[in-house]
Structure formats: C-alpha cells, structure tokens
Amino acid sequence: EVQLVESGGGLSQPGRSLRLSCATSGFPFDDYAMHWVRQGPGKGLEWVSGISWNSARKVYADSVKGRFTITRDNAKSSLYLQMDSLRPEDTALYYCVKDIGSGVVDMASGFDYWGHGTLITVSS
Amino acid sequence: DIVMTQTPLSLSVTPGQPASISCKSSQSLLHSDGKTYLYWYLQKPGQSPHLLIYEVSSRFSGVPDRFTGSGSGTDFTLKISRVEAEDVGVYYCMQGTHLPAYTFGQGTKLEIK
C-alpha cells in the first residue's frame, strides 16, 4: 500500500521559515518524481514544486520560486520542502504527491497518490 | 501557464441519475508523444484528492466503471453514469502536458439531492 505522510506544518510569522517532510512507503521511491501541491483555505489546488528521481531537476511554481527549495533523500524514501520568506498567501494545506509516470520531473505526466497534507498558517 | 476551465462549478444530482462535468484547456493537451495528459481527481469532504481518470479515459485502480472520461484536444468530459451518495465531493481536472507548471481546473462541487 502506497503511503505518503507529511509533517512539519504549523504557525509561522511572515518572513520566517518552515521545513516540511514527507515519509513514504509502499513503492520504489527512487523510481519516481515527487511533488508538492497546496490548497489554500476553501480554495482549489495549486502545484508548488517537483523533483526528479535523482534530484537532478527541480521545478517550481512562479509563486514560490526563489523562496522554496525541494529536496529528497532516496535512502530514507523522504521528500522535503524548505519554505523561506513565508508570506500570508502561503497559508495552505500542503500535500506530498507521487508522480504517476517516469522519474523525470518535467516529462509529461500526472499524479497518482496524495498524502493527507500538513497545514501551514502564515500570520503575524 | 495553461488555464483549465471547468463547468459547471456546482451540480446537484438525484441518486441514480447521470452527471457530467466539462473541462476546457486554453491550449491543446495533445503531447508530441501522441498522448494527452489530462487527469480527473475527486476530493471527498475532509479528504485529500484521489485519482479517478488518467490520460483522458483510463480508469485508475479501483475506480468504478460508472466513471468515464472522454475528450481530446482542448475539450474533456467526466461522466458519472449513475450517481451514488459516495460520489459527493469536488472534482478537479488537471493537465500534465505543458510543463513544468501542472494546472488544475477550479473544481466542480457535486452534491446529492
């Protein structure tokens, strides 16, 4: 059974940092690209960032580029998101998401499995 | 980025009746490899999204056959042949053709009458 379990959420002030983690199991982690997708309160889904299987390629939404950094540790089957210079508009539920296709992050694909999410609230 | 537009944004359906959701993209989703990377997800109340349909019309593992995806180019449709109470939630389409920015539709909320 594929499992994706996020952690690291919480309350942060604007301008501060948080680091999200996603522990995975049930599939060969190092075969797949991975992503973060967020959902603001009462809002729709927004793709945030993706990383290829070997970390060679990392991509970001314009809204977080230069502030967020995605990383992975294949030995630990874990995905991370370092979130710096947080803004109130970053307030959202952040989902760890598995790519459905190849390990290459910007090769046409989609998502199959989603974690339950971890909530980030940015407020002074 | 590609804009995905869903209609309607909400619908109320009597159990046993059909339902249909449209998703239109601002550019063709046909990839140079011949595939079309259009996906449908359902987010049930209080849950994370789960995959229903991938590449326009392929049902994901465990998805009931009352769910059918169709379409091509820029116009896509998700149909539920006979709505059941467990189908309530918000349905999202998503494109994975024009990367790196995956984009979602606004969501369509399905309620039961």
Image: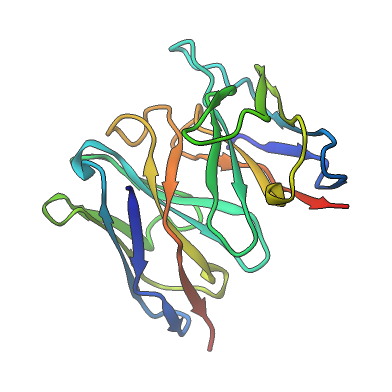
Badge count: 0
Above-or-below relation of B28 to B110: above
Is residue A51 among what the camera can see? yes
Viewer-proximal residue, B92 or A25?
A: A25
Which residue is nearer to you in this view: B67 or A95? Answer: B67
Question: Would residue A98 be found to the left or right of residue B69 on screen?
Answer: left
Residue B107 appears in view: no
Residue B28's spot in the image, x, y percent? 62, 20
Compared with residue B68, is residue A118 higher up or lower down, i.e. above or below? below
Residue A55, percent from left and from top: 21, 44
Quarter-wise, where is residue B63 in the image?
top right
At 42% from the left and 27% from the top, the residue drawn is A108
- In this orientation, which residue lies closer to the viewer: A122 or B105? B105
Q: Which percent across, then down, holds residue A113?
A: 42, 46
In the rendered image, the vertical position of residue A92 relative to residue B87, given as above or below? below
Q: Residue at x 62, y 28 (%)?
A: B65
Who's the residue at 24% across and 55% down the image?
A71
How does the figure colour the protein chain or chains? rainbow
The location of residue B82, given as percent across then percent down, is 77, 34
Asked if residue A60 lies left or right of residue B25, the reply is: left
Asked if residue A38 lies left or right of residue A66, the reply is right
Can you name the residue that lies furthest to the left here? A75
Give the vertical position of A25 relative to A33 (above or below): below
* Residue under the image location 29 percent in, 32 percent down: A104
